[in-house]
Image (cartoon, rainbow, N blue to C red):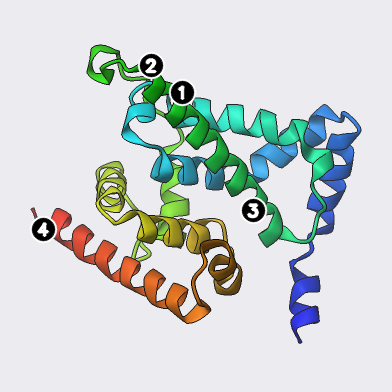
Amino acid sequence: MAADAKNRDLDPHTESLLRATRSGDAVALEDLLTRHYSMVRAFVRLRVDPVTRIRESASDLVQSICREVLRRADEFEYRGEAAFRAWLCEAALRKLHDRRDYYHAQRRDPGREAAPVGDQGWDDLAGVYRSSLDPMGRALRREELEQLEAAFEKLPEEQRQALTLRHLCGIDYGEIAARTGRTEDAVRKLVSRARARLAELLASARAN
């Protein structure tokens, strides 16, 4: 049964795109970016630290992440969509850590710098949030989307990490447990608490 589930997760189209990308196929590269862009962008918006956020837009960060990922495509062994999404999220997190360290090292006041131009594609972003994070699972207006991001930022770091790994990146509980040094049961409880707390924060924000 587990083997059948794993095989169902293998997407021949994504695998063929990866092979073409490694051969320098620009069209395949663009197609691969398009298939996963919204997920990576949502991950970046939720995980970027405040210092980086005021200096770089999520869209610019995602473009940089995708360029780096595709330059390293030959390092990746395709084992299914979940593994591929996890690889993308790991690459995104490395980039966010690098940018955070860089900007903190500058020791400048971010308030003195102009905030980047806002990201476009709110409908795509709202779709990702609706399917992965919003407890009501309904269409989100831009105001509600921003409320969700603000509520997410109030969660403890371990809850933000667990929610994004599970519900944005699609990593299973067992693998998250291995990555974070927790038991699978502890991860399940952490994700459950995070979703409950996010729902509380959203209900409070939407009531005001």
The front one of 173 and 126 is 173
Residue 46, by quadrant, is top left
Mark 1 vs 4, N-terminal side? 1
Please report the residue visible at 28 percent of the width from the left and 62 percent of the height from the top. 198
User: Which percent across, then down, holds residue 168?
Assistant: 51, 56
Q: Is residue 74 left or right of residue 191?
A: right
SS at circle 4: helix
User: Which residue type carries mark 3?
Assistant: Arg
Q: Are marks 1 and 2 in contact (CB under 8 Å)?
A: yes
Please report the residue visible at 58 percent of the width from the left and 70 percent of the height from the top. 172
Specify few, some or many for label 1: CA neighbours under 10 Å numbering under 14, 14-19, or 20 or more. few
C-alpha distance separating marks 1 and 2: 7 Å
Residue 188, by quadrant, is bottom left
The front one of 19 and 159 is 159
Of marks 1 and 3, the one in the foreground? 1
Residue highlighted by disc 1:
102
Residue highlighted by disc 3:
85
Of marks 2 and 4, the one in the foreground? 2
Please report the residue visible at 25 percent of the width from the left and 17 percent of the height from the top. 109
Q: Is residue 74 left or right of residue 136?
A: right
Q: Is residue 96 left or right of residue 148?
A: right
Mark 2 vs 4, N-terminal side? 2
User: Which residue type carries mark 1?
Assistant: Tyr
Vertical order, 142 against 61 (above or below): below
C-alpha distance separating marks 4 and 3: 35 Å
Asked whether residue 124 is in view, the answer is no
User: Which percent across, then down, holds residue 181?
Assistant: 52, 67
| Quadrant occupied by the N terminus | bottom right
Residue highlighted by disc 2:
106
User: Which percent across, then down, holds residue 121?
Assistant: 46, 35
Q: Are marks 3 and 2 in contact (CB under 8 Å)?
A: no
Residue highlighted by disc 4:
207
